[in-house]
Image (spheres, rainbow, N blue to C red):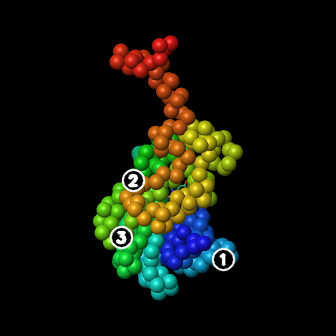
Amino acid sequence: MAGRLEGKVAIITGGDGIARATALRFAEEGARIVGTDLAEDKVRETARLVTAAGGEMVHVATDLMDEAAVNRLMKFAETTYGGIDVLAHFAMDLRVGELASVSVEDFDYTLTRTATMAFLVSKHAVPFMVARGGGSMVLAGSQSGSLGTGFLGNTGHLFSYAVGKGAVIRLGVVLANVLGKHGIRVNIVSPGPVATPNAVAFFGEEGSPERSLLVDAHMLLGRISYPEDVASAALFLASDEASNITGQNLHVDGGMTASGGMGLAKEEAQQIYDAMVPPREWDKRWLRPEQ
Ligand SMILES: NC(=O)c1ccc[n+]([C@@H]2O[C@H](COP(=O)([O-])OP(=O)(O)OC[C@H]3O[C@@H](n4cnc5c(N)ncnc54)[C@H](O)[C@@H]3O)[C@@H](O)[C@H]2O)c1
């Protein structure tokens, strides 16, 4: 049986974490992969793992904030594998800090390493996808790009990241509008907390009090995500199974967004709210008789 990405060439940005899980998954489904990251050691290790598992992947170090280098990356994919069908963009960088202390420089740094970087890789992938008669882009958003930063472990100090990811989500929708006529689909995959090496610093190790609090307060399904959860969603959106889906933002977040970002805490918050604000006359229609 043919793999779900058989015959496709995929550019994957980002060296480890979600990008690594995605490279392994895409390769398993028959894609030939060009991986890239600023940190060559990370993407080299991913390529080694993919190859060891029987997949096909080459890698190249790229600073994705350098437009000429981004263009060289796309050309490298064409010379190596003949074109580009899929772009899965996960690379990003950020500088965190509370509103009062964040400098304009740090705010801009985060915005450019989220939104501008996604714009650059998308822009330069387009001509190569047009040449193939179409393609699929999957951009990494974030649950914080939709909800803001109001959840445990991700409070105000990540606000510039949330703004940047909000822009990535909007970029994906705008690109979907602009590129549909070329047969290019653009979707966003928005993770909630994922147990990647970098993110564990924010969410705590498995079993730690911080992690337990985060899960109890926000995760409707009782756990945070693993990189493989996000890779599976990216695979679906990249593949022809999603051939009539574009401009969507798929949350992979254990129900966090569905709960309004409050999860189980919402029930407690509702009880506190109800005690403070008795139901008004017109609300009482909805109450059960015993209430
Ligand atoms: N892990 C989470 O909990 C989580 C939650 C929501 C969204 N996301 C998003 O998912 C994606 C992947 O997350 P992750 O935790 O695996 O990320 P990560 O931090 O492990 O990977 C990001 C990679 O981007 C690379 N990078 C940074 N600047 C670069 C540049 N200028 N050029 C090229 N590469 C550069 C870094 O070297 C790094 O390897 C990110 O976009 C992230 O914002 C992650």
Residue at image location 37% in from the left, 77% down from the top: 133
Q: Residue furthest top?
A: 290
- Is 43 rendered above or below residue 165? below
- The image shows residue 157 at horizontal and vertical percentages of 48, 47
Badge 2 amino acid: Gly
The reply, left or right, for residue 173 in relation to residue 139 is left
Label at residue 250: none
**Which residue is situated farthest in the front direction here?**
1
What's the amino acid at mark 1?
Answer: Gly
* Mark drawn on residue 183: 3
Q: Which residue is mark 2?
A: 166
Q: Is mark 3 within 8 Å of ligand 1?
A: no
Residue on which the image places disc 1: 54
Residue 85 coordinates in the image, percent (x, y) = 45, 74
Q: Residue at x 53, y 49 (%)?
A: 253
Amino acid type indicated by mark 3: Gly
Q: What residue appears at the point 59 percent right and 43 percent down from the top-left corner?
A: 221
Q: Is mark 1 within 8 Å of ligand 1?
A: no
What residue sits 41% from the left and 21% below the top? 286
Q: Position of residue 280 (x, y in %)?
A: 37, 17
